[in-house]
Image (spheres, helix red, strand yellow):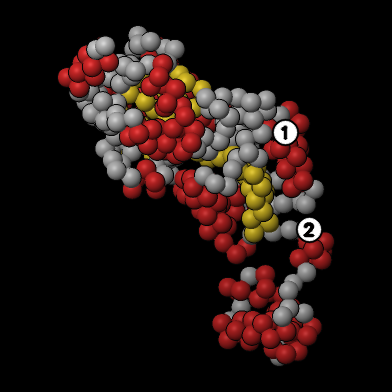
Amino acid sequence: MRDVSKLAGVSTMTVSRVLADPSIVAPDTRERVMRAVDQLGYVPDLVAGSLSSRRTNFVGLILPTLTNSNFADTAQGLAEALGQSYQLLIGYTLYRAGEEERLVRSLLARRPQGIVVAGTLHTASTRRMLLAAGIPVVEIWDAPGAPLDRAVGFSNFEAGRAAARHLLSLGHRRIVAIGSEADGDRRDARGEARLQGFAAVLREEGVETGLILRHGPAPVSYAHGAAAMKLLLRDMPDVEGVFAVSDGSAFGALMECRRQGIDVPGRISLMGFGDFEVGRECEPAISTIRVDAKGIGMKTGQLLRDLIDGRDAGAPQSIDLGIEVVPRGTTALPCRASVSNQAMQGSEP
């Protein structure tokens, strides 16, 4: 830093201010310092800085997977809201509770300024560590009544309810939800909550409640949706409507229907969740439950900045950003004539 200050003709304190928060330094001075930094190839020693200030200026983010575009959008929104003041260190669990526990322990050993974790179901050890951490903890992608500290998301249970109500409103009665099944400590708790919300509406409406297909481990994918749809069509050829807990799975289900020559939505209505780009751009476009994935990240980042800087010392709270049903080309009123014709054709020798 002394070398940079000599080359730029400023004090080491000015160099420190430029590197810590460029906005508080005059533009011409900032430019001279950064030009010197570039010429010398200087990289600040953040470990040394954190030892003196006890601020590491990084936030830990734990996600189930890095391949889901919604989680990627959330990470982007969080990074944008945190700005240059904080850096993200991202880990992923592949939906394993034990891996989440390991990541939490590893992150806390590095003294983050805050931790963001997807979901609200944790091992007892993870809960104890997070409660004792003494830093802001934000659970995302759910809206629990009693979060550990803060939560930003929506009700996955209500998302499942909304999907069932939409399919029933179109006149469908043989409707099914497809998701993943638990595999040891590998479990998609948010997808399971959507399945439970779906089943709850069926019970309330007096519709058959056993129509939930859990197939394969999390995370769901295009291949998962195709395989689940193939099983469903084999075991329940008269199905009228299908809700997949992810647009990725719904896309796979749509492709399986095409392979079998089944008209969507003329013969079967199909819904997904998440409003993925693939669901918007395929033909027909997939009806879905939209959530503001990037908005979850943005809101979480703003909340973290307030908590870290001491501007929000309120009680634990849960912020629900809501959901939206988005009807598109894969859901429609049932075509009874088509169903009857297919049933008659299937009965012919």
Residue projecting furthest to the front: 349
Mark 2, secondary structure of its residue: loop
In this rendering, would 176 be left or right of 6? left
For disc 2, the marked residue is 54
- Residue at 29% from the left image edge and 34% from the top image edge: 330
For marks 2 and 1, give the CA distance: 29 Å
| Residue 273 drawn at (x, y percent) | 42, 35
Q: Quadrant of residue 212?
A: top left
Q: Label 2 sits on what residue type?
A: Arg
Q: Quadrant of the N terminus?
A: bottom right
Instruction: Tell me if residue 138 can be seen.
Output: no
- Return the residue nearer the eye: 118 or 313: 118
Does residue 196 sit above or below 53 in this rendering?
Answer: above
Q: Is residue 135 visible?
A: yes
Q: Which residue is mark 1?
A: 98
Q: Residue 56: where, in percent of width, then height?
A: 74, 58
At 47% from the left edge and 29% from the top edge, which residue is drawn? 227
Measured as percent of width and height from the top left, residue 75 is found at 55, 51
**Would you identify the image quadrant in which residue 129 lies?**
top right
Q: Quadrant of the C terminus?
A: top left
